Amino acid sequence: MSVVERRQSLAEQVTLLDLVDRVLNKGVVVTGDITLSVADVDLVYVGLRLLLASAATLEREAAG
Amino acid sequence: MSVPDLESRLLAASGDVESLARTLGDGASPFPRRVNADPESVERGLAQLVLTLVELLRQLMERQALRRMDQGSLDDEQVERLGLTFMRLAERMDELKAEFELSDEDLNLDLGPLGSLL
Amino acid sequence: MIHLYAFVRGLRQVEPGLEARPLESLEVVTGAEQTDPLQHGLVVERLLDQADAVLPVRFGERFRTEDDLAAAIAPRLEALEHQLDHVAGCVEVGVRIVPRREAAHADDGAAYMRARLREQLSTDELHRALAAKARDSVQTNRDVGYLVPRADIGAFSVAVERLLESHPALDVLCTGPWAPYSFAAAA
């Protein structure tokens, strides 16, 4: 593989990974619930969200 | 648009592009909003959760310490102590991640409406 | 199963396999069940050339019936319309800065803190400079997404290259243009 070809395929890999990362982790979330499940039993949700929302607020306040 | 056209979307890169590419992860599961801890790896699932929270707190604390250092409200001894503590914490995190075979991306829980954790 | 791809405005063509349902001032782009995130992404990127404004939907939003879809969208409709206003005519450029691990091997605590602070200040400076050239910017994890009008993409790319040269201590990855995924956070 020539230097040019190798650089092209790295660029392609990187942008492919970036696109899949976007598709999975960004974009509008319409249904939006997070659940933690063990053995297909849905367990922790609201409590964890409140905890993490507090952490996010802490950071905003620290930045203020 | 075909897949080959994607390569034109790398606009710029500096430093080690290959390791930068690795930070993009492998795309993992198609349903990242569900954190599944199957019975065989409950321990790993819990480790993932705990380490993610620890990493979040470490980042929050370090960022705040850097802000105060920048503002000049920390004395030399405090800076030294904080630096050593954060260095040790980072090392310990690396050890724990290795022990549970968790990558940086594994610790980045997707929380739906809250976005991603880290 | 109805697979949701994006919310758009000013859609000029609907490619085979997709449906565009009008809803108030926008259109809802859907298709048959889609199990491949890459294909989902490629559809959305093609929409960028086919519509005036595109708000990408995260992979995995699926609905059994049209009623389910309508019910899920209804409470977010107003927010979606505002978001479409915001991203109209724009694309996203992503900038990811990865902190170097050198700082972790510093000689002492103070050296570590100084290295981390330098890194942090350099990062902040880079982001400030780019944000000034974009309509908007938002951070998701380590990525910062910049909302850039299509016509300004060339100039923005040049600005990124110049800034990378003046911040040699940072590892930076810049990709784009993309549909504005980062500006489509849940309402």
Image (cartoon, grey):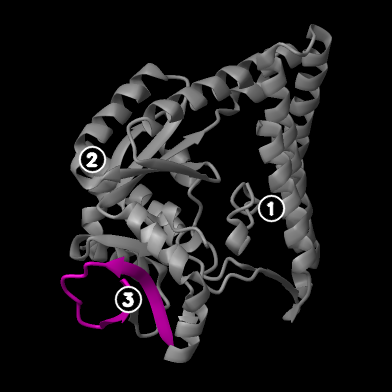
Residue pointed to by mark 3: C29
**Which of the image's four quarters has the N terminus of chain A?**
top left
Secondary structure of residue under mark 1: loop
Badge 1 crowding class, 10 Å Cα cut-off, few under 14, some 14 to 19, many 20 or more, is few
Region in magenta:
C1-26
For the point 79% across and 53% down, which residue is it? B50
Label of residue B101 in the image: 1
Q: Is residue B18 magenta?
A: no
Q: In screen coordinates, is C109 left or right of A8?
A: right
Q: Is residue A5 left or right of residue A59?
A: left
State the SS at label 3: strand
Residue type (three-letter) at the residue carrying disc 1: Glu
Q: Quadrant of residue B86?
A: top right
C100 in relation to C179, above or below = above
Asked whether disc 1 touches disc 2, contact meaning CB atoms under 8 Å apart, the reply is: no
Q: Hey, what amino acid is under mark 3?
A: Val
* Snapshot quadrant of residue B64: top right
What type is the residue that disc 2 sits on? Ile
Which numbered disc flags the more N-terminal residue, 3 or 2? 3
Q: Disc 1: which chain? A: B
**Chain letter of disc 3 in the image:** C
Q: Residue at (60%, 67%) from the top-left corner?
A: B33
Q: Are marks 1 and 3 on the same chain?
A: no
Q: Which residue is mark 2?
A: C153
